[in-house]
Image (spheres, helix red, strand yellow):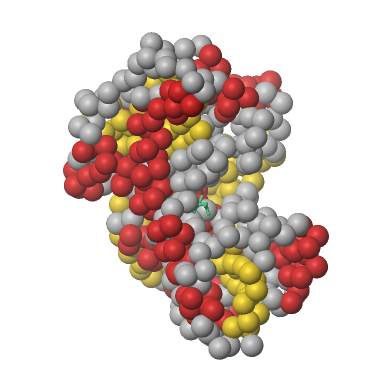
Amino acid sequence: MFKVLVSDPISDVGLKSLIEDPMVDLTIQTGLEKEQLLNIIGNFDALLVRSQTKVTAEVINAGKNLKVIGRAGVGVDNIDLDAATDRGILVINAPDGNTISTAEHAFAMLISMARNIPQAHGKLKHGVWDRKNFTGVELNKKVLGVVGVGRIGAEVAKRAKAFNMDILGFDPFMSQERAEQLGITLASVEQIFEKADFVTFHTPLTKETKYMLDKPQFAKMKKGVRIVNCARGGIVNEEALYDAIKEGIVAGAALDVFEEEPAVGNPLLELPQLVATPHLGASTEEAQLNVAIDVAEEVANVLHGKGFKNAVNLAILPEEDFAELKPYLKLGQKLGSLAAQISTGRIEKLEITYAGNIADLKCEPLSRYIIRGLLSYHLADDVNYINAYKAAKSKHVEIVESKTHTSKGFANLVSISVKTANEYIQVAGSLLNGYGAKIVNINGYTVDANPVGNLLLAQHTDKPGIIGIVGTMLGEADINIATMQVGRKVAGGDAVMVLGVDKRIPEDVVKKLEAVSGINSIFNVDLQN
Ligand SMILES: NC(=O)C1=CN([C@@H]2O[C@H](COP(=O)(O)OP(=O)(O)OC[C@H]3O[C@@H](n4cnc5c(N)ncnc54)[C@H](O)[C@@H]3O)[C@@H](O)[C@H]2O)C=CC1
Ligand SMILES: O=C(O)CCC(=O)C(=O)O
């Protein structure tokens, strides 16, 4: 008998596959206090949650019998994935079932904000017939910027087309062809922020998207811009949004998500320009039924040892598949992440070459780690070891793998080339006997860098003084340089500098470094995870 606990309100019709399973003993107990959950979780093989239950490391460690955690929805930010992975507990989600509901909610928020519907409704309910203070704006012919054109962003764009809006879109994986299909003009995030009358966010919260709309970006926006965020709190910096509203840059904001939830007491709620809902994007009968069906079926499959589609972590790696490759896996993931962080433009193709003695191994598991490293920089937990090839296919990234015994003097060499719409990036790494994993080549320059922590990568002209200036600027910003590597092809030509630094370099320091004469580009690379 499998014991399954449902600890958040999840549609019971959707749970039918579990309720009717003779091998499943289902307990539905919502609103549990932390201590209550800790006391009972040890009895269960599976836990099903929405977003209220905080599945912390403490809960996971108390779940001695837990085999699977199911999230009825997309985001898994309420589940400690590392703790689950460490314990070999599979985490699955239901990414497709709430797309339409969330897109409709974002659109409802956009229209209510444009026409001041919640504010006017509130006044009328309190007996005030106010027709003077609620003049709105039309959507017709306005520029809508869609940041993140995945499942939900694409549905929002379709709806905006029906309202005759001009749509600018940015997504690191959106091709020209896909943009044309959706009637979207491809634009950079900077262009969107500068040109849009409305901006709506539909990305996950990642290191890259955290505070992507902040004070410097607000300063460049059109006066009177309106902002929608129905994705995740923290994509828009709330403090900066508050100031931008007060300064009259932002005419309205519609938020379904907040940096801290429940957002009761949030200062933004005091502003009349704010339209807010308490994380209701997926709260429709249809979405809740869909996600419940998806997650219940997947959990039942896992418990019965059958196949499943939507794993979020790497809990069940078949060890025998990768025993010999194990030392390379982290290196592979870091090479993928490095390539993602130093490339610009839509990723179109990933070529992986295994050279030297690694060419004799069955390298598919390593390729999965490389793909994961490359794609997860943008897709966060949506891509993992299990779905890596599928995620690449769904984002139209071509994967080409090859092997050779010619390894440029290294016993083993893992090289990856990433073709984007703008450029061609190459990085390579090796496991060096006695030294561990190293990045040994970046865009044709020989380097010797540890694939860990924070790196500063500068492409520059090989001339006296540059290294000193960089060192001084970092010193002034209180950033300690742990390691330093310089590579060049010819004296006086193009060169690359790779610095290992003890903490992430703030964006204002990066901007100053970019302005140094002789420095062509700067990348602030994070290889911590
Ligand atoms: N308010 C709510 O109740 C709900 C909120 N969500 C949120 O909406 C988000 C989007 O969901 P889906 O569309 O289903 O996910 P998705 O994975 O289909 O789309 C996300 C898109 O964001 C893109 N992206 C990543 N980094 C980016 C960047 N820096 N700039 C521009 N685009 C970037 C990705 O390439 C991807 O195409 C989820 O991550 C979740 O946090 C999802 C469902 C309900
Ligand atoms: O369960 C919910 O209502 C939250 C939905 C959500 O934010 C998600 O699926 O990412």
Seen in the picture, residue 367 relative to 205 is either above or below; the reply is below
Asked whether, in this view, residue 127 is left or right of residue 160, the answer is right
Seen in the picture, residue 171 relative to 276 is either above or below; the reply is below
Q: Nearer the viewer, residue 110 or 184?
A: 110
- Measuring from the top left, give residue 67's x and y in whole percent: 63, 76
Is the N terminus in the top left, top right, bottom left or bottom right quadrant?
bottom right
How many tags in the picture?
Answer: 0
Asked whether, in this view, residue 517 is left or right of residue 346, the answer is right
Q: Nearer the viewer, residue 20 or 68?
A: 20
Q: Residue at x 80, y 68 (%)?
A: 39
Q: Nearer the viewer, residue 360 or 317?
A: 317
Q: Residue at x 58, y 25 (%)?
A: 268
Asked whether, in this view, residue 417 is left or right of residue 19, the answer is left
Residue reaching furthest to the front? 127
Q: Quadrant of residue 222?
A: top left
Q: Residue at x 76, y 74 (%)?
A: 42
Q: Residue at x 51, y 11 (%)?
A: 247
Whether residue 43 is visible: yes
Seen in the picture, residue 36 relative to 224 is either above or below; the reply is below
Q: Nearer the viewer, residue 509 or 32?
A: 32
Q: Quadrant of residue 417?
A: bottom left
Seen in the picture, residue 313 relative to 440 is either above or below; the reply is below
- Measuring from the top left, give residue 232's x and y in whole percent: 52, 42
- Measuring from the top left, give residue 238's x and y in whole percent: 57, 28
- Measuring from the top left, give residue 63's x and y in whole percent: 73, 71
Whether residue 147 is visible: no
